[in-house]
Amino acid sequence: MKKKIIIGMLLIIAIIIAIIIASKKDEKDGVYFTDKTYNKEINPISKETAVNIIKAEYGDLVTVNKDDIKKVGDKYKVELFITINDEEHSHKKSIGVHEIDIYTGDMKIVN
């Protein structure tokens, strides 16, 4: 009878320890970087890199340089123009204002 009680107590203690270890593991897995700490640990992209991102997306028809890019908060804003060449002359056409996230490099159209 005493052996059954001791085995039962050890089994209950083992189950409790397993539950505690599993919950601690879940807490460690659930830790995500907040924007403030994440941004402090990652270097932002440069304006030259932002120009390369734009050129990779739209090709050589886009006329943009690093002086056209303005930093607003955590984003670079730039109005993009494409050059359309005809036989007689060329046109510049705006394709809208684009934002580039300085930490991820994601680009999206604002207008």
Image (cartoon, grey):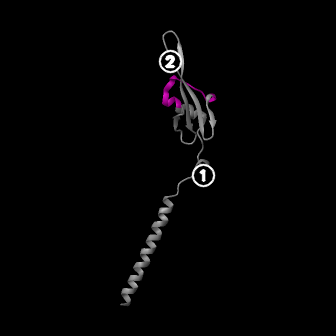
User: Residue at image x 44%, y 78%?
Assistant: 13
* Label pair 2/1, CB-CB below 8 angstroms: no
Callout 1: few (<14), some (14-19), or many (20+) C-alpha neighbours within 10 Å?
few
Q: Is 17 on the left or on the right of 42, as rendered?
A: left
Disc 2 residue type (three-letter): Ile
Q: Earlier in the sequence, mark 2 or mark 1?
A: 1
Q: Residue furthest bottom?
A: 1
From the image, which quarter does the C terminus lie in?
top right
The relative height of residue 30 versus residue 22 in the rendered view (above or below) is: above
Write down the quadrant of residue 75 in the picture: top right
User: Residue at image x 55%, y 53%?
Assistant: 33
Q: Which residues are magenta?
A: 54-67
What's the magenta bit mostly, secondary-structure-wise?
A: helix
From the image, which quarter does the N terminus lie in?
bottom left
Task: Report the residue marked by disc 1.
Answer: 37
Write down the quadrant of residue 66 in the picture: top right
The relative height of residue 53 versus residue 12 in the rendered view (above or below) is: above
The question of residue 38 being in magenta is answered with no
SS at mark 1 in the image? helix
x then y, percent, for residue 39? 59, 47
Task: Report the residue marked by disc 2.
Answer: 84
Q: Is 102 on the left or on the right of 59, as rendered?
A: right
Callout 2: few (<14), some (14-19), or many (20+) C-alpha neighbours within 10 Å?
few
Q: Is 109 on the left or on the right of 3, as rendered?
A: right
